[in-house]
Image (cartoon, rainbow, N blue to C red):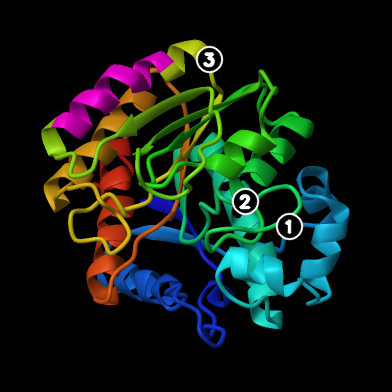
């Protein structure tokens, strides 16, 4: 049995013209329920406004909550910020924080949303409104739940927003493996960055991860790992440019969990990116990722 965080309002009606597949979050939950997997479902609260403002510019938070995001910022985000998008953007950080708290108790927990790693202090970007990873990290540290933490970001796109929002904080270590030529064009500086060439395959990817993840753990001495488990490094992903297979993604997740368990570190995962015309195929990649992590953690019989 494992612990899963989900809110019905993660899946919202896509704003007009939005290319982001909002519906996949509901489909992920439906597929998990239909899988027969044994899990306990937890419903998160919205992240309170003071915690949003602790990481993001209060003026930007006000723009989102009052549905007054300037069009320039909405273009940078990739879709209009409607009332349901604003609510979802408050729920996802609450879900990531709750998953982390559950992981501290149970060893592993997953959020069926989150991974909004492009959101910056004063604006969203790249389908991200608020940066749930940075917000949850800040709250965990500020409230004394952990003294140090590690963010492992294996989405195909660099976690530039997370790196910038947590820059200079020795207690929060950011580690990103991403496509060298993929979004964002201008990369930030994580505490440890590894950029991969287009069409990197399973073997090269897994060798890279196996070489660098222990280094990130050794350098950060974390009390918890927040894992951005995006599946957009898959060969068939519309925005990916890498060439991982289903088996490669599974091996990636098992490697991450094995490293966490060997070091005795709890791990909370967030959904991250995954894009394609076949939303069901993307959904099943996310579901396999969550179930693989649960299985590798020992939470599934």
Give the image quarter of residue 283: bottom left
Q: Position of residue 63 (x, y in %)?
A: 82, 68
Q: Main secondary structure of the magenta part?
A: helix
Q: Which residue is mark 2?
A: 132
Please tell me which residue is depicted at 77% across the width and 49% down the height of the picture: 56
* Nearer the observer, 271 or 175: 175
* Nearer the observer, 56 or 198: 198
Relative to 205, 222 lies left or right: right
Q: Which residue is mark 1?
A: 47
Disc 2 crowd rating (10 Å Cα; few below 14, some 14-19, many 20+) is many
Q: Position of residue 67 (x, y in %)?
A: 78, 77
Separation of marks 2 and 1 at Cα, in angstroms: 9 Å
Q: Give the magenta range.
A: 204-215
Q: Does residue 207 show up magenta in the picture?
A: yes
Question: Looking at the image, is mark 2 or mark 1 earlier in the sequence?
Answer: 1
Q: Which residue is mark 3?
A: 221
Q: Position of residue 10 (x, y in %)?
A: 54, 72
């Amino acid at each position: 049995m494992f612990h899963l965080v989900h809110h019905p309002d993660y899946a919202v009606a896509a704003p007009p013209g939005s290319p982001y597949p909002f519906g996949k979050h509901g489909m992920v939950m439906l597929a998990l329920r239909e899988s027969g997997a044994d899990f306990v479902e937890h419903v998160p609260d919205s992240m309170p406004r003071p915690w949003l403002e602790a990481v993001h510019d209060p003026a930007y938070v006000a723009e989102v909550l009052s549905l007054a995001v300037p069009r320039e910022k909405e273009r940078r985000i990739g879709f209009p910020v409607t009332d349901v998008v604003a609510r979802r953007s408050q729920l996802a950080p609450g879900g990531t924080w709750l998953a982390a708290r559950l992981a501290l108790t149970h060893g592993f927990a997953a959020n069926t949303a989150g991974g909004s790693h492009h959101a910056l202090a004063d604006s969203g970007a790249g389908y991200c409104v608020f940066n749930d990873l940075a917000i949850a990290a800040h709250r965990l540290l500020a409230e004394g739940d952990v003294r140090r933490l590690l963010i492992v970001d294996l989405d195909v796109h660099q976690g530039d927003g997370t790196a910038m929002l947590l820059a200079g904080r020795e207690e929060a270590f950011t580690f990103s493996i991403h496509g060298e030529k993929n979004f964002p064009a201008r990369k930030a500086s994580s505490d440890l960055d590894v950029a991969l060439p287009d069409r990197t395959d399973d073997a090269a990817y897994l060798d890279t991860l196996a070489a660098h993840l222990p280094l990130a753990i050794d350098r950060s001495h974390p009390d918890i790992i927040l894992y951005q488990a995006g599946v957009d490094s898959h060969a068939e992903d519309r925005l990916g440019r890498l060439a991982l297979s289903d088996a490669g993604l599974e091996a990636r997740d098992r490697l991450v969990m094995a490293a966490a368990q060997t070091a005795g570190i709890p791990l909370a995962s967030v959904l991250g990116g995954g894009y394609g015309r076949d939303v069901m195929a993307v959904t099943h990649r996310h579901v396999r990722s969550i179930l693989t992590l649960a299985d590798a953690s020992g939470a599934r019989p």
